[in-house]
Image (cartoon, helix red, strand yellow):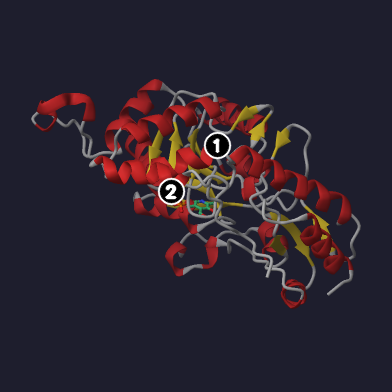
Amino acid sequence: MIPLFKVAMSDKAAALVGDVLDSGYIGQGAKVDAFESALAERLDNPRVLTVNSATSGLHLALHLVATEAGRDGEVLATALTCTATNWPILANGMRIRWVDTDPATLNMDLDDLARKITPSTRAIVLVHWGGYPVDLDRLRRVLDQAERVHGVRPRVVEDCADAWGATYRGVALGGHGNIAVYSFQAVKHLTSGDGGLIVLPDDELLARARLLRWYGIDRDGGAARFKNDIPEYGFKFNMNDINAAIGLANLEIVDDLLARHRENAAFYDTELSDVDGLELTERAGDRDPSFWYYSVKVDGRDAFARRLAEARIATSEVHHRNDTYTATRGSQALLPGLDAVAERQIALPVGWWVSDEDRAHIAKTVKAGW
Ligand SMILES: Cc1ncc(COP(=O)(O)O)c(C=O)c1O
């Protein structure tokens, strides 16, 4: 079977982890600092903090927003994503109001967002679907307009879990004035085993997030750090040196991996551009996606998946719409854009492990019909 996801592990990871295990210190220490510095350099953004998962990073992001803006009102969110994008909204005692999906990109529909922002909007949470960047300048204009009309400018939380390496207008995600969260989970482009990164838009939020990721305590406070006052409670969301060592090793290989994801995607863009019953997703010239998977929309998705499975090709919808779960009851909305794609969207393998022969086999199988 050609898998949809695969763990990429540098052959230097075991030795680096071994050093940490032998060092007698495996908590948050020098390796976390080194990983954080290296990530800041890659993103060209100094305001980064590692965490132990993107889910933790998103929880921390929503906590920052909730304590700033209040838990009343609502959070505008996209239903087509991982539950990890939306559960932190609920876990922080906030209410979800669904925004529709743009069938062209499978990202949040920014026209629907513009319609749904009101003075009760406390935050906007969105995902870069499969690593395809949301139109962030258009989003900024929507926020400008909301500020003019309603006098509110809600914070935006960008879920960049699938988008390591993606850029919008030449700038890495996290550099566009919002809170952004990356994932280094097992099968992501860049893995640290488990882990994540929260990127903050200003120094004040960065300082607060740094405290809150570890109980609200200033780790740099020396021996007196537990005696010093703790202004507000925090969490245990920090990364440790074992995960950071894995991440550091994999940071050396991730650019090559990402390049192969993009090469394979470009191949499909050409090969699958004219297949009956199959539609590609949007490609805009101002963004460079990371293609964690390759999303297409097909008629007869079950038959398509069965046909590809027979040809030993794994596929998946990856994420199921979140608005149908009992956990989100009370947040129902009419979402015609999502309805149009929810049963049609499906992901093909596109990653570094997909060889020239594999991708030719995948394209040929799809073109033969289902
Ligand atoms: C879109 C999205 N958000 C969040 C997550 C959660 O990431 P983590 O496992 O690092 O918590 C994932 C994981 O697959 C994801 O795909």
Quarter of the image where the C terminus is located? bottom right
3D distance between C-alphas at marks 1 and 2: 14 Å
Q: Nearer the viewer, residue 120 or 183?
A: 183
| Residue with the mark numbered 2 | 14
Q: Residue at x 77, y 38 (%)?
A: 284
Name the amino acid type tagged 2. Ala
The answer to whether one can see residue 217 in this image is yes
Q: Is residue 28 above or below residue 341?
A: above
Task: State the mark number for residue 325.
Answer: none
Name the amino acid type tagged 1. Glu
Task: State the mark number for residue 252.
Answer: 1
> What is the crowding at mark 2: few (fewer than 14 residues within 10 Å), some, or many (at least 20)?
some
> Which corner quadrant of the image does residue 229 belong to?
top left
In-image side of 211 versus 301 (left or right): left
* Residue 105 percent across, percent down from the top left: 71, 48
* Residue 166 percent across, percent down from the top left: 64, 37
Q: Residue at x 66, y 58 (%)?
A: 338
The answer to whether one can see residue 133 in this image is no
